[in-house]
């Protein structure tokens, strides 16, 4: 795809502007493009302001703490009911499943450039497609780019975990089932531990931390500010946790680095409970308590956000570091979207996310044609989170090819 193909005016500008200005226009056009991708006006109004703050004003990249005002209500219940047996069960499992990040084998010597213990497999990015453009990379350059890509992914995991930590705290306050609050407290602890172990790994083994990706910032910002508890749940526990599980599982399967593998194995067990919690809470709420119009709004929102997430995590920070002088942003977008590693990631992510959406009542015949159009119908019949253990998630047996 050529740089400005989705924007006819920009296509004309591309022909007449000098190179330096053209590059800047391309960056702005790309930052604004999520707003053009979203078709539904209610979805646009819910994430539009966050898109301006994250993608255009770049609030996550200004080198100082970011404030995100919250507007949800804390829901107290002074009678302390046992009101949700499956959640009570999940709470007990979560207490038994706690682990200590200090116990991971931190003594492991990690050399991110060692070709014998690669962090990512050599085919993750698909070098042949770079070479087809006449760009020849040395072995040394390829190892360094893989290091950058792995650091970028782990940095986004870390930033996502910080979002998950604060969102879990908000959800614990606002959820209306008391068993859900007790369970939520364990998730806050889990997410704190995830921040701890990812940060320690990046800091002591990778020695390379990337800033928060603009599109990840947009999603976190939108969820932190939304006052509706079920939207926080849907966004965080189903969509963001779904992406996280897809990414963690992909990296778990593909990395040969033993400390990272062990770290991810532990984190995935926790994340399986988090998605399970989201399915339990939302199935009850969406199918029994919402009006049809409210349910439809959430159904549309989930579809648009799923597509945005698929299209928007494009590692531009790695592009700017390695390829900016070699090819355009549009060529990078095409390259990274079609890379073998990203295809495997999308397969695992949607294999987890789509069945969960079905299970909570957001994949009715009304929206199914939209998923069919983007090639996701094959995931309709998969197993949802309430049928999968953390151990199942380490395998790949339940996702259709
Ligand atoms: Fe987490
Ligand atoms: Fe989580």
Image (spheres, rainbow, N blue to C red):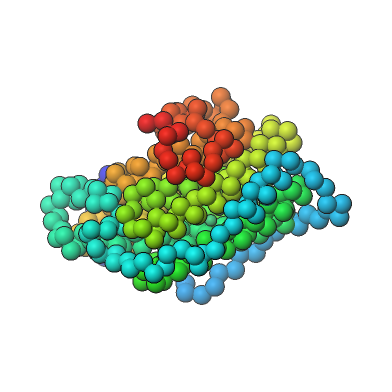
Q: Is residue 243 left or right of residue 146?
A: right
Q: Residue furthest bottom?
A: 64
Q: Residue at x 23, y 58 (%)?
A: 116
On-image quarter of the N terminus: top left
Q: Is residue 210 left or right of residue 165?
A: left
Which one is nearer the viewer's eye here, 275 or 365?
Answer: 275
Which one is nearer the viewer's eye here, 297 or 126?
Answer: 126
The percent coordinates of residue 12 (x first, y second) are 29, 50
Residue 14 visible in this rendered orientation of the protein: no
Q: Is residue 380 left or right of residue 96?
A: left
Q: Is residue 358 left or right of residue 108?
A: right
Q: Residue at x 32, y 47 (%)?
A: 341
Total numbered badges shown on the rendered structure: 0
- Give the vertical position of 111 relative to 251 (above or below): below
Q: Residue furthest right?
A: 79
Q: Residue furthest top?
A: 365
Q: Residue at x 14, y 60 (%)?
A: 138
Residue 194 visible in this rendered orientation of the protein: yes
Q: Residue at x 60, y 43 (%)?
A: 276
The percent coordinates of residue 206 (x first, y second) are 35, 68
The percent coordinates of residue 367 (x first, y second) are 54, 29
The percent coordinates of residue 18 (x first, y second) are 24, 62
On-image quarter of the C terminus: top left
């Amino acid at each position: 795809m050529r740089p400005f193909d989705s924007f006819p005016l920009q296509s004309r500008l591309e022909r007449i502007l000098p190179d330096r200005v053209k590059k800047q226009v391309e960056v702005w056009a790309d930052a604004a493009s999520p707003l053009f991708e979203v078709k539904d006006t209610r979805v646009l109004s819910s994430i539009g302001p966050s898109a301006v703050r994250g993608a255009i004003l770049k609030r996550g990249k200004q080198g100082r703490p970011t404030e995100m005002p919250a507007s949800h209500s804390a829901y107290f219940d002074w009678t302390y009911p046992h009101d949700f047996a499956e959640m009570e069960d999940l709470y007990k499992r979560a207490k038994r499943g706690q682990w200590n990040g200090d116990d991971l084998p931190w003594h492991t010597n990690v050399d991110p450039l060692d070709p014998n213990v690669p962090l990512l497999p050599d085919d993750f990015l698909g070098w042949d497609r770079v070479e087809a453009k006449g760009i020849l990379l040395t072995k040394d350059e390829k190892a360094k780019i893989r290091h950058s890509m792995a650091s970028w992914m782990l940095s986004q995991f870390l930033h996502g975990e910080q979002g998950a930590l604060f969102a879990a705290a908000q959800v614990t306050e606002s959820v209306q089932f008391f068993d859900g609050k007790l369970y939520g407290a364990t998730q806050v602890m889990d997410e704190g531990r995830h921040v701890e172990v990812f940060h320690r790994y990046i800091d002591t083994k990778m020695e390379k931390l990337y800033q928060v990706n603009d599109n990840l910032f947009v999603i976190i910002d939108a969820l932190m500010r939304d006052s509706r508890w079920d939207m926080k749940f849907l966004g965080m526990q189903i969509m963001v946790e779904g992406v996280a599980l897809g990414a963690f599982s992909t990296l778990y399967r593909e990395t040969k680095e033993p400390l990272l593998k062990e770290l991810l194995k532990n984190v995935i067990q926790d994340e399986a409970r988090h998605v399970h919690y989201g399915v339990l809470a939302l199935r009850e709420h969406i199918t029994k308590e919402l009006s049809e119009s409210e349910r439809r709004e959430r159904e549309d929102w989930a579809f648009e956000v799923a597509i945005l997430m698929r299209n928007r995590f494009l590692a531009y920070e790695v592009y700017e570091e390695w390829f900016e002088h070699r090819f355009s942003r549009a060529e990078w977008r095409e390259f990274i979207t079609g890379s073998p590693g990203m295809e495997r990631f999308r397969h695992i992510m949607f294999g987890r996310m789509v069945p969960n959406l079905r299970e909570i009542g957001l994949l009715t015949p009304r929206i199914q044609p939209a998923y069919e159009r983007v090639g996701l119908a094959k995931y309709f019949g998969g197993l949802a989170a309430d049928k999968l253990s953390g151990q199942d998630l380490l395998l790949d047996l339940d996702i259709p090819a």
